[in-house]
């Protein structure tokens, strides 16, 4: 059980370069299974979720090699349509391989996916979209088998703008016969990235990043190269770290345009922010002020993935705040660990309320999921004395090396694996 130890109470100062995006890299890796040749990805984050997707691709017959952030996936031969249970149950994003495998092989066999414990995470929208395209599912215990001799373009209206279901529908439609219209799509930047990647490999997709995507199926995709964009959630985490712990930092390559709502909140709480094409500079020297009532939502609202980090800043701000979670119903569970550090968060349903002005004290706490784990590390930066965050492996699913990054911002932090 690896841990991260932090001696808190010192403002952050320095510069950090933001890694490639997890949520952009994973669906693009899945998309590489549609290409009967080589896909080269640059700036691919070195995180355990990417390793897990590499393993999944290898298991279906792709050759995968990785050198730092350069990932080469040769999917000339896909020999297997069974996704191994061990990897599928470890990572929810494995479900997006279903659409790609159906598109490539006309069949796929997989287990209901796993992932972070942040509430109910059904896959009904994914399955409904794939069924519309002609896939026929059979279920046996926790296993699902899907078949389609040739997927056919269809009109798909998602009940909710699910990121994963939008990606799955786009992936399955890319090689389908005819045109697919997808409505109520998620508009997260990672969807635009997926559509742009696929278009670069010969697909014909319009409207990526909007609520209506049109996919004209093509017979075949070709080899291509792609640079993964910087991770807006990692950038947001470190920005909130500076907001919460105080200090001044330069976040190189942080995508300011994808963080508009978070930057607004940070400014309301007392941070000075300058953003340009090279990144974001953030400084907070005065007292933290409450921004009032906040809520997460679909893009471009405050991302649910930054809800837990934000709690750390809100509980210390002057005045009452609240944060309502609108996407995942179990994501406020981290409040319990934060309260062990003195956060004073009251959770009622999907809303966290805090009176503000809390002083955090160093404690031993346990990460139960990725973003909640990162929030505990941020709390450790703010707390007086030493904190230890156990279960580092959850944080490593999405952060290349949170210890390295926070050290470069001057934090007194170390770890043991
Ligand atoms: C993706 C992101 C995750 C982010 C989330 C919301 C990746 C790899 N992960 O997750 O970091 O927090 O978007 O921005 O990109 N839902 C259903 N049925 C479905 C699918 C989803 O009810 O079939 C519900 C979920 O339970 C949740 C909501 O829809 O309440 C949003 O989920 P979704 O957008 O699908 O998130 P993910 O794609 O899993």
Image: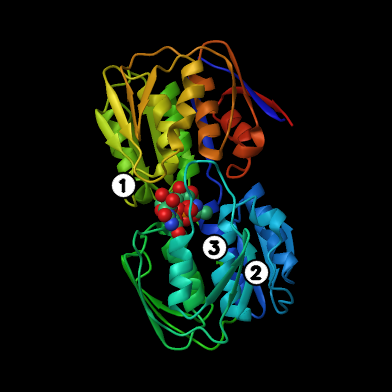
Structural distance between the alpha carbons of marks 2 and 1: 35 Å
- Residue 74 seen: yes
Left/right placement of residue 319 relative to residue 310 reads left
Q: Quadrant of the C terminus?
A: top right
Ligand 1 has an atom within 8 Å of the beta carbon of the residue at disc 3: yes
Q: Which mark is residue 301?
A: 1
Query: Local crowd at mark 3 within 10 Å, few (<14), some, or many (≥20)?
Result: many
Q: Residue at x 36, y 20 (%)?
A: 285
Ligand 1 closer than 8 Å to label 1 CB: no
Q: In this rendered view, identify the residue nearer to me: 98 or 188.
A: 98
Residue 251 vertical position relative to residue 379 in the rendered view, above or below: below
Q: Residue at (63%, 72%) from the top-left corner?
A: 108
| Residue found 43% across the figure and 70% down from its top | 129
Count neighbours of disc 1 (C-alpha within 10 A) and say few if under 14, some if 14 to 19, many if 20 or more: some
Query: Counting residues from the N terminus, which is met first, the one under dot 1 or under dot 3?
Result: 3
Q: For mark 1, give the secondary structure.
A: loop
Q: Are there few (<14), some (14-19), or many (20+) residues within 10 Å of tag 2? A: many
Task: Identify residue for label 2.
Answer: 109
Work out whether mark 2 precedes mark 1 in sequence or the reverse, and give the earlier one.
2
Q: CA distance from mark 1 to mark 3?
A: 22 Å
Q: Position of residue 282 (x, y in %)?
A: 39, 33
Q: Which residue is mark 3?
A: 27
- Dot 2 or dot 3, earlier in sequence: 3
238 lies above or below 136: above
Q: Which mark, residue 40?
A: none
Q: Real-space Cα distance between discs 2 and 3? A: 18 Å
Question: Does 394 sit left or right of 336 as displayed?
Answer: right
Q: Which x, y percent locates residue 12?
A: 49, 24
Picture coordinates of residue 215, whole percent (x, y): 41, 79
Residue occupying the far front of the picture: 141
Rendered position, 65 above or below 342: below
């Amino acid at each position: 059980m690896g841990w991260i130890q932090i001696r808190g109470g010192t403002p952050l100062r320095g510069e950090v370069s933001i890694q490639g995006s997890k949520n952009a890299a994973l669906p693009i890796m899945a998309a590489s299974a549609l290409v009967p040749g080589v896909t080269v990805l640059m700036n691919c984050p070195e995180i355990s979720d990417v390793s897990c997707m590499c393993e999944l691709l290898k298991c279906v017959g792709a050759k995968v090699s990785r050198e730092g952030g350069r990932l080469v996936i040769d999917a000339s031969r896909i020999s297997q349509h069974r996704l191994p249970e061990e990897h599928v149950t470890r990572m929810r994003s494995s479900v997006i391989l279903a659409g790609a495998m159906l598109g490539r092989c006309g069949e796929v066999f997989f287990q209901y996916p796993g992932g972070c414990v942040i509430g109910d995470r059904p896959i009904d929208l994914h399955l409904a979209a794939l069924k519309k395209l002609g896939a026929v599912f059979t279920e046996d215990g926790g296993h699902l088998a899907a078949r389609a001799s040739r997927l056919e373009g269809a009109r798909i209206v998602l009940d909710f703008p699910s990121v994963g279901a939008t990606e799955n529908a786009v992936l399955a439609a890319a090689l389908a016969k005819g045109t697919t219209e997808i409505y109520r799509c998620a508009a997260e930047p990672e969807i635009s990235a997926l559509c742009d990647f696929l278009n670069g490999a010969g697909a014909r997709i319009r409207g990526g990043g909007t609520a209506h995507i049109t996919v004209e199926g093509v017979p075949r995709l070709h080899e291509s190269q792609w640079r993964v964009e910087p991770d807006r959630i990692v950038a947001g985490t470190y920005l909130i770290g500076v907001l919460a712990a105080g200090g001044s930092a330069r976040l190189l390559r942080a995508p300011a345009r994808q963080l508009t709502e978070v930057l607004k909140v940070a400014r309301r709480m007392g941070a000075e922010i300058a953003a340009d094409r090279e990144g974001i500079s953030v400084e907070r020297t005065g007292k933290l002020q409450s921004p009032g009532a906040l809520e997460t939502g679909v893009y471009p609202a405050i991302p649910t993935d930054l809800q837990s980090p934000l709690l750390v800043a809100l509980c210390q701000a002057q005045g009452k705040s609240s944060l309502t979670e609108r996407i995942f119903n179990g994501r406020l569970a981290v409040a319990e660990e934060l309260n062990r550090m003195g956060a004073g968060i009251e959770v009622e349903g999907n809303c966290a309320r805090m009176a503000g002005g809390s002083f955090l004290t160093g404690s031993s706490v346990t990460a139960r999921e990725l973003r909640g784990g990162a929030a505990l590390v941020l709390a450790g930066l703010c707390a007086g004395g030493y904190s230890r965050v156990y279960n580092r492996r959850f944080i490593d699913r999405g952060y290349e090396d949170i210890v390295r990054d926070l050290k470069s911002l001057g934090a007194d932090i170390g770890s043991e694996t």
